Amino acid sequence: TQRFVEPLSGAGRIVNSYENARASGERIVDLVERPVSVRDRADAVRPERVEGRVEYDDVHFAYLPGRPVVEGLSFAGEPGETIAFVGPTGAGKSTAAKLLLRLYDVDGGAIRIDGIDVRDLALDALRSNVGYVSQDVFLFDGTVRENIAYGAFEADDEAVVAAARAAEAHDFVRNLPDGYDTRVGERGVKLSGGQRQRISIARAVLQDPAVLVLDEATSAVDTETEVLIQRALDRLTADRTTLVIAHRLSTIRDAEGIVVLEEGRVVERGTHDDLLAAGGLYSTLWSVQAGERATDAVLDRLLRAD
Ligand code: ATP
């Protein structure tokens, strides 16, 4: 089946719907580009409260016919747990996570939140209960304050600042030319990857969803920023079901479940200790990254000594 994507660029669509939503006082708009094939069912449900149990049940997905990207993925995460997707580049980690956000619909199997198929949930209910944090978060042309309060239009200044503090963003925001009133986005101040990540965390803190999809940063940040971001993420993910697309294995040692993907298939699963003991792909990736961490530490010391 052909997948149609709305011809309007994602950014344009989001800005328009943001402006419209703001004008009409609506609560929330889409954070992400979504193919038009993904839409509400006539009898879509809006659960009153979501505990955050997440279940992938034999999930299959392909962007293009005959080119499967996710093949038979199954796992379950209890409310509050962290489940990590790990694997080589192109293994299908991001795709598997995007299916939970319903950026695409599964071709086979099902994804359930609290036992409800995500295709039966109203999209606005899905959006308000499943947060998304990433470095490539979309910042629209508006102030920092508006970008943090995105989707939570009733949030007052105090709540925005509290969220920014929890996200370790307050200090850098204060130092921008106009503080929280600084314009960002295409026509505003350009923020670094680490700053965007923290704006995205602040948004999620305000949103306070039961389930979080966390796309770990890939672009480099300095050690100090890394520590700040990790601290903010630890706060954000505590007591929230979190699906992590993990690039740095050191951040997911304590995850309740680690799912190792290779070419769309689960090749291993378990905790960090289980997987190290198993001596398979995960332990190889771990050794490689441990080597990289050691090199980084040496470089860091040399640079500081300068
Ligand atoms: P990385 O660690 O590099 O982010 P990943 O494990 O997250 O990789 P995905 O981004 O999910 O992997 O990609 C899985 C496969 O699907 C890759 O072969 C990729 O080229 C392909 N793919 C990803 N997005 C699309 C898309 N929008 N259309 C077509 N193919 C895609």
Image (cartoon, helix red, strand yellow):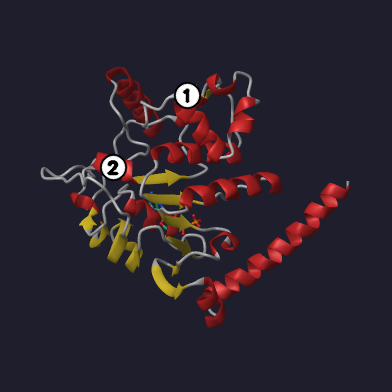
Q: Quadrant of residue 287?
A: bottom right
Residue 306 percent across, percent down from the top left:
88, 46
Q: Nearer the viewer, residue 197 or 169?
A: 169
Q: Nearer the viewer, residue 30 or 51?
A: 51
Residue 25 percent across, percent down from the top left:
29, 21
| In the depicted structure, whether residue 128 falls above or below residue 64 | above
Do tag 1 and tag 2 residues touch (Cβ < 8 Å)?
no
Q: Quadrant of residue 56?
A: bottom left
Residue 222 appears in the figure? no
Specify few, some or many for label 1: CA neighbours under 10 Å numbering under 14, 14-19, or 20 or more. Answer: few
Residue 182 percent across, percent down from the top left:
56, 21
Q: Which mark is residue 35?
A: 2
Q: Nearer the viewer, residue 237 or 11?
A: 237
Q: Which mark is residue 168?
A: none
What is the secondary structure assignment of the residue under circle 2?
A: loop
Three-letter code for the amino acid on which mark 1 is drawn: Asp
Disc 1 Cβ-to-ligand 1 distance below 8 Å: no
Three-letter code for the amino acid on which mark 2 is drawn: Pro
Residue 142 percent across, percent down from the top left:
47, 22
Q: Name the residue located 53 percent from the left edge and 79 percent from the top edge.
A: 280
Circle nearer the N terminus (1, 2): 2
- Cα distance, mark 1 to mark 2? 34 Å
Q: Name the residue located 76 percent from the left edge and 58 percent from the top edge.
A: 297
Q: Name the residue located 45 percent from the left edge and 67 percent from the top edge.
A: 256
Left or right, residue 241 beside residue 280: left
| In the depicted structure, whether residue 157 falls above or below residue 49 | above
Specify few, some or many for label 2: CA neighbours under 10 Å numbering under 14, 14-19, or 20 or more. Answer: some
Indicate the quadrant of ligand 1 in the picture: bottom left
Say which residue label 1 marks: 157
